[in-house]
Image: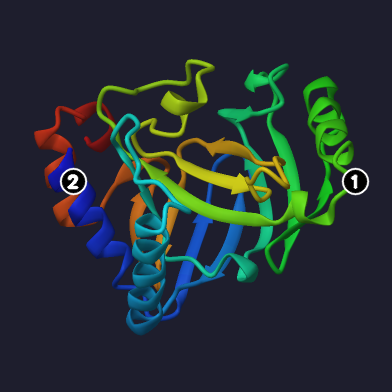
Amino acid sequence: MQEFGRAYSEVLRRAKSGFRVTSPAGTDITFKAYTPEELKERLARYRRAVAAGRRRRGGMLGGQGMFPAKVNTVNGTIVFDGAIWPPAEVGAIKEPIEMKVKDGVVTEIVSDHPEARIVKNWFAHFHDPDAYSIVHISTGFNPGVKRITGDIVEDERVFGCVEIGIGMASPQKPCHTDGIILHPSIWVDDELIEKDGIFVEPNLKKLAKELGMQLWVD
């Protein structure tokens, strides 16, 4: 799994302009990539924050990586069809939840079914525009997590998924949620690396097979 994660990170870092993510449920977003120099500076800041005790190193279940994404450039439509948590009343999603995003901010929650209304009310109760800001876009690749369980720590590591974090998590602003997009297609610049949840980039496809994920790659 670690080898797959390293290879996945290398593929994502090949981006010179940016990314596109789509899904059968209706997701279609684009966003720009950080340059290698910007990534170096961000990593240096992160390490300084860890050393100062303002950030902590990850110690959770493995199998999650990050897009080198300029999150304030995300535009398009997000459709969460796997899970979203919090709010605790939702978790595993029964009906897809569609959101419109402009310049990294959720501008509208389009869906109006019961789960979507719970999510709308959860965002609204913070009375804080920062609650709607996208803060990270992640990848899931844990071969032991093959389906949504309702536990977000597992769900955001479903093999092949994309996870999007919305809202700044801090003691001052505890308004953070994570949503899961299943069966995504991912482009790095113009290169398709994953199609409907199946890795098609040659090295990632090979490594996925070695992890026993033939169901997803054949």
The residue at 19%/54% (across/down) is: 6
- Near mark 2 (Cα within 10 A), the count class, few <14, some 14-19 or many ≥20, is many
Instruction: Tell me which amino acid carries mark 2.
Output: Phe
Q: Which mark is residue 83?
A: none
The residue at 14%/36% (across/down) is: 209
* Placement of the C terminus among the 4 image quadrants: top left
Which label lies toward us, 2 or 1? Answer: 1
Compared to residue 27, the image places residue 159 above or below, namely above
Image location of residue 96, percent across then percent down: 68, 31
* Placement of the N terminus among the 4 image quadrants: top left
Q: Which mark is residue 127?
A: 1
Q: Which mark is residue 4?
A: 2
Foreground residue, 30 or 121? Answer: 121
Foreground residue, 200 or 82? Answer: 82
The image quadrant of residue 94 is top right
The residue at 35%/84% (across/down) is: 37
Instruction: Tell me which amino acid carries mark 1.
Output: His
Foreground residue, 54 or 114? Answer: 54
